[in-house]
Image (cartoon, rainbow, N blue to C red):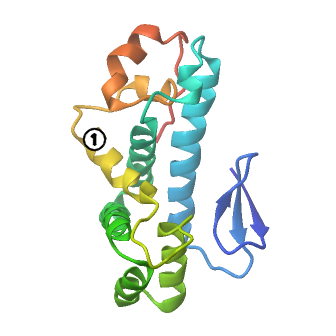
Amino acid sequence: AKIEKITTTNIRIKSNYTIGIPEHKKVAAHRIKQLIAHELMAHAITRENGEKQQWHIFSYGFPRYIYSQEGLAVWHETLATPEYKANILYRAARDAFLAQEADRLTGKELMNLLLTMFKPANAWQTYIRLKRGITNTNTIGGWGRESVYFIGYNQLSQLDKVDDIFYSGRITVDDIAVATKYNSIAHIDRPQF
């Protein structure tokens, strides 16, 4: 992976698999390892393998694939930095909790909760992520996508092992049998740790 400085406020993976790190931010080495594991070793590999498949559903994604995809990405973060596994899983669980709270709280109520958990700048950044697309902050509702990391990781952790078929494309835990039956590539690329 290539790393370059960018002017945005958050770390980004660019379309060419370059990791963009904000010029003004100090980022710990373990966070870069986690980001590489998450974005490249999970998402990029499954996308590349999915595009090699005869059946486009592997590339576009089976229904609800996002849970298994993000669960796989979190699992890779824990493999890349096992000493931070508790922190990674805490972050995923916290974000799932906050997504649920965002769905049931008004904007003001959510911000009050976030200010008990984060510094103001981080509270605001989290608020924006959770209430994305809500035009009237007096109403309840939120963007619940943040829960997929925790739910997906928990689904994968129930399996005996994470089989190569998970790298064949954007599949789900529920579609392992179908994906195995219709997999059309002889060699499934899989990241090595």
Residue 25, percent from left and from top: 65, 79
Up/down of 150 relative to 45, above or below? below
> Residue visible at 78% across and 73% down?
7
Tell me the element at label 1: helix
Say which residue appears at 34% left-offset and 45% top-offset.
152
In percent of width and height, residue 115 lies at 40, 89
- The image shows residue 182 at horizontal and vertical percentages of 46, 9
Q: Is residue 110 above or below residue 79?
A: below
Q: Is residue 92 above or below residue 139?
A: above
Could you tell me which residue is drawn at 39 percent across and 80 percent down?
Answer: 110
In the rendering, at what x and y percent does residue 190 appear? 50, 30
- Judge by depth and name the residue closer to the eye, 9 or 20: 9
In this orientation, which residue lies closer to the viewer: 121 or 2? 121
**104 relative position to 192: left or right:** left
- Is 106 left or right of 151, judged from the image as shown? right
Quarter assignment of residue 35 = bottom right
Disc tally is 1
- Above or below, 28 against 179 in this view is below
According to the picture, the residue beneath numbered tag 1 turns out to be: 155
Q: Is residue 158 left or right of residue 88?
A: left
Residue type at numbered disc 1: Gln
Q: Is residue 71 left or right of residue 51?
A: left
Q: Residues within 10 Å of mark 1 (few under 14, many from 20)?
A: some
